[in-house]
Amino acid sequence: MRILHVIAGAEVGGAETFAQDAITALHARGVTQLVLARPWPQAMRRYAEAGIAARPFGFSAVDRALGHARRVRAAAAELGADLVHAWMSRAAAFVPARMPCPVLGWFGDYYDLKYFRRADCCAAVTPDISRYIVERGMPAERVFTVTTFGTMPDAPRVDRASLDTPEDAKVLLVLSRMHRVKGIDTMLDALAEVPGAYLWLAGDGPERATYEAQAARLGLSGRVRFLGWRNDRKSLLEACDVVVLPSRYEPFGTVIVEAWAMGKPLVATRADGARQYVADGRTGLLCPIEDAPALAACLRRALGEPGLAKALAEAGHAAYLADFTRDIAIDRMIACYETCIRLGPR
């Protein structure tokens, strides 16, 4: 099987990181691949280290005006591709007409289907996004649900002292971009109602300074650690007590899978992804969006009731093993590819 991947995402982000993880896992399964992507150093280095062919590609309006979209068709022909996998809307919109093989459009969110006019099939990260695609006209037999898996390479153990955190402190972990949709402001308001707990915020983004100011205003600077972008997610998960996903909007939320994989209790808001996958009171605790007192109450339960925390962690881990391991996700992706190739162009 020969797959051409077209990726137009940001340098760092959940969808882009998963694309790299999936491509690396497919390479390990013997799938021949070529990646066309923005030349972000971290991503290109990772492909090179894995032995995966990757070429820099621009997705700007200037690139389009210069006719660079034709390079996608040329690369597919050169590779002898069986399928083009266009990751998310900008990449899908850049795929030209008259492709020599079928095109699969990847939906990590409820994207506008106008960007996927060249897609012959679609893959979505949740059943509800798949439903959304079908309702907007894509034949159901050409729509697939392919969930993601956690991004957790091994890393050295986290020393709490290095993060200015007492060894006996209860630690809440948020793995997230510093963006309004991620609900970090709600998380900080909730922390004010959870005495003694420390909060690790692993991630970066445009709102970081705003949240640092909020933490100071709430008198929380002594208990909040802004860690910036981290490559040791697994070690942070190992070192924390509870994983929190406080998002206003989250179509899936790979952090859910990562918490379950590491056997950690999860507290999340009722955003789309958590509503579809987390069983409240069994595999995690759910609370309303933008409700700091309710979030604080869930956090106090997860930290203060050892029996509940253990039960949540065990049930979450069982859910992970049943549905979200790397092998399960890649099996589904390969099956999706095979069906798309068999169905051919629309």
Image (tube, rainbow, N blue to C red):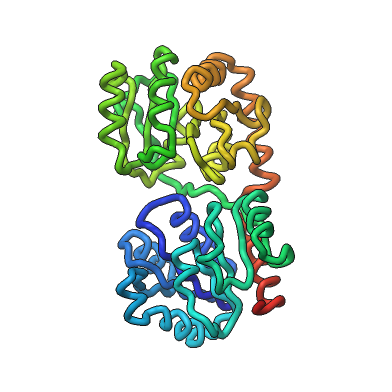
- The answer to whether 321 is drawn above or below residue 332 in the figure is above
108 relative to 40, above or below: above
| Residue 168 visible to the viewer | no
Quadrant in the picture for residue 264 = top right
- Of 130 and 227, nearer the camera is 130
Residue shown at 41%/18% (left/top)?
Answer: 197
Q: In the rendering, at what x and y percent does residue 144 appear?
A: 67, 60
Is residue 171 among what the camera can see? yes
Against 266, residue 223 (above or below) is: above
Residue 211 % position (x, y): 31, 30
Q: Is residue 247 left or right of residue 148?
A: left
Q: How many marks?
A: 0
Taking the image as shown, residue 83 lies to the left or right of residue 92, namely right
Q: Residue at x 44, y 20 (%)?
A: 190
Answer with the quarter of the image where residue 67 lies.
bottom left
Quadrant where the image shows the N terminus: bottom right
Foreground: 164 or 77? 77
31 or 190, nearer to the observer: 190
Residue 154's x, y, as percent?
45, 47
Image location of residue 32, percent across then percent down: 54, 76
Q: Residue at x 29, y 36 (%)?
A: 208
For residue 127, side relative to residue 116 (left or right): right
* Quarter placement of the C terminus: bottom right
